[in-house]
Image: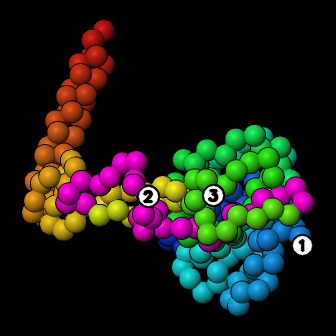
Amino acid sequence: MAAFLMFLLLPWCASGAAVCRHCPGPLHNSSVVARYCTSQAGTKSEGRCCWEQGTRPERLLGLDLSNCSLNSLPPGLDEATTTIVLDLTENPLTLLPNSSFLGFTELRILAVPLALKCPGGNSAWEEVTTNGSSRFCQGQKNPCNSSEELAWPCPENAACAPDGPGLVQCLCKSPFHGYKCLREGTFPMLLFCGILGAVTLSVSLLLWGTQRRKAKTP
């Protein structure tokens, strides 16, 4: 019965909860996440996170990982892509790979140690400021609207879409799909599922028959 209830509650669990417990204690009062959370109606703080209430699952808005003795970005950070405010200050971080923020399209305020640059560079943000030992990257720009030429231009039948600070992705325009969006028409989902199911069944039967013969062998 308990397992059944867990199954029912699973879709209601908020994403990013694991990374909220990576660092003990509540939000730091001096953190930009704490200031953001208290300024927004309909939010609540739990541990190092700020959540939007009234949504299912509850949406993660802010993540405070300041003063957590981090030498590298914590595992599970990719589960917090809905984050609007992220604080990484007062950590001995030496590297901040751009790929770590893949999918963080909602990120508006990122606070990092002064020794580090903003992911994507200054051109990926509307404003970059410093205060004491912290650097603040604010107002993430849409690189698809930039006049600068993209390093990887999208194919003819695809459209550019932001995918994080200074990052883009190419999405196929309807009705194109497939490699470089060269195939036209709807994706043959029934055929794909039928072939995949047949292959899976064949492999399963083959493995079952092999194991059964081995079991009968004295």
Q: Nearer the N terminus, badge 1 or badge 3?
A: 1
Q: Which residue is mark 3?
A: 122
Q: Which residue is mark 1?
A: 29
Front residue of this view, candidates 105 and 129: 129
Distance between the Cα atoms at labels 3 and 2?
Answer: 14 Å
- Tag nearer the camera, 2 or 1: 2
Q: Nearer the N terminus, badge 2 or badge 1?
A: 1
Residue at image position (75%, 78%) is 36
Residue at image position (61%, 53%) is 121
Distance between the Cα atoms at labels 1 and 3?
Answer: 27 Å
**Residue 152 shown in magenta:** yes
Q: Nearer the N terminus, badge 3 or badge 2?
A: 3
Q: Which residue is mark 2?
A: 148
Q: Are marks 1 and 3 in contact (CB under 8 Å)?
A: no
- What range is drawn magenta here? 132-158
Identified by mark 2, the residue type is: Glu
Front residue of this view, candidates 75 and 183: 183
Identified by mark 1, the residue type is: Asn
Colour logic? rainbow
Residue 71 shown left or right of residue 90 in the figure: left
> Mark 1, residues whose alpha carbon is within 10 Å: few (<14), some, or many (≥20)?
few
- Residue 54 locus on image (x, y percent): 60, 87
Please, what secondary structure does the residue beneath circle 1 have?
loop
- Is residue 26 at least partly visible in the picture? no
Identified by mark 3, the residue type is: Asn
In the depicted structure, whether residue 208 falls above or below residue 129? above
- Is residue 150 at least partly visible in the picture? yes
- Residue 170 locus on image (x, y percent): 33, 57
- Tag nearer the camera, 1 or 3: 3
The image quadrant of residue 50 is: bottom right
Residue at image position (43%, 58%) is 148
- Residue 107 locus on image (x, y percent): 60, 67
